[in-house]
Amino acid sequence: MSSERIQGEVFADERRDAIARLVADVGRVRVDDLADRFGVSTVTIRKDLTVLEQGGRLVRAHGGALSATGAGQERAFEIRKRLQRSAKDAIGRAAADMVRDGESIALDASTTAHAMARHLRARGGWLHLTVVTNGLRIALELAGVSGITVVMPGGFVRPEALSLVGPMGEGLLRRVNVSRAFLGATGFSVEAGLCDGTEGEAQIKGLFVASATEVVGLIDHTKWSRTTLVTFCPTASIGTVITDAPAPPTMAAALRGAGVRVIEVVG
């Protein structure tokens, strides 16, 4: 490899680090402004933004990019959907492959569950599949699909997550029985189990856990070893975890030792 190529790669890494810091500081940047600032073409900047988005350091937007952290607030659904996209798609595909016709399943309002819903829709050929969900986007994804019945609890709409939460849904969710609940999380550790950052979401997910014969955690690699506000499912109640490889070896070994099946997919 030539010295010019090596130098170019070093400069690209430095430029991308600077872009990531700038986005984190100001919240939003434009492609044209970045091109002027760094003295490169807009094509180069767009490539930089793609690399940074793939690394979870920002989110591409029309004409520029947004901060991936949302200044401490929960990320909006459309932004979260674009983070770790390939990992979520692979996890969603593996989760959909577990579903058998005739089952009743539960899906939460997570973006990984939404990826799973897309694969359920694409698979087709359903005769009688019942999906219980508090996710508005998931309900819309599966509405009208032949052979799939969508059931939603009542509740208040959380616009950040496009979900239904609150005590209105308890009456329904305490009466239903589902074979498997497929649940995302904002954090997961062996000690804390599956966690969520908001009380409302955790309450609904806890009801899904109580109604399910098996809990399947949909966990991309950014959630491992993180503990957030509320535990909605302890590790002892998890049957399977689907994650993008590689899962942390010590955690994967601890889970398998506790009888939890760990499925690793390539994201």
Image (spheres, rainbow, N blue to C red):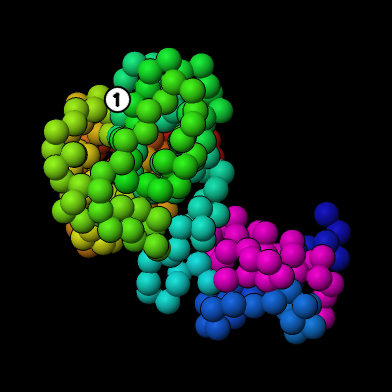
- At which x and y percent is residue 211? 17, 33
Give the class, few, some or many, for how many residues have Cα within 10 Å of label 1's Cα (few <14, many ≥20).
many
Q: Residue at x 69, y 77 (%)?
A: 30
Front position in the image: 194 or 171: 171
- At which x and y percent is residue 246? 45, 40
* Residue type indicated by callout 1: Ser
Compared across the picture, whether 144 is left or right of 167 comes to right
Total numbered badges shown on the rendered structure: 1
Q: Quadrant of residue 58?
A: bottom right
Q: Residue at x 16, y 53 (%)?
A: 167
Q: Is residue 5 visible?
A: yes
Front position in the image: 100 or 220: 100
Locate the C terminus by quadrant. Answer: top right
Locate the N terminus by quadrant. Answer: bottom right
Q: Is residue 98 visible?
A: no
On screen, 100 above or below 57? above
> Is residue 201 a member of the stretch shown in magenta?
no
On screen, 10 above or below 56? below
Q: Residue at x 42, y 76 (%)?
A: 71
Q: Quadrant of residue 247?
A: top left
On screen, 260 above or below 16? above
Front position in the image: 108 or 255: 108
The span picked out in magenta is 38-66
Q: Residue at x 46, y 35 (%)?
A: 143
- At which x and y percent is residue 165? 26, 54
> Is residue 44 a member of the stretch shown in magenta?
yes
Residue that mark 1 sits on: 104
Compared across the picture, whether 50 is left or right of 200 comes to right
Q: Secondary structure at mark 1?
A: strand
- At which x and y percent is residue 168? 18, 51
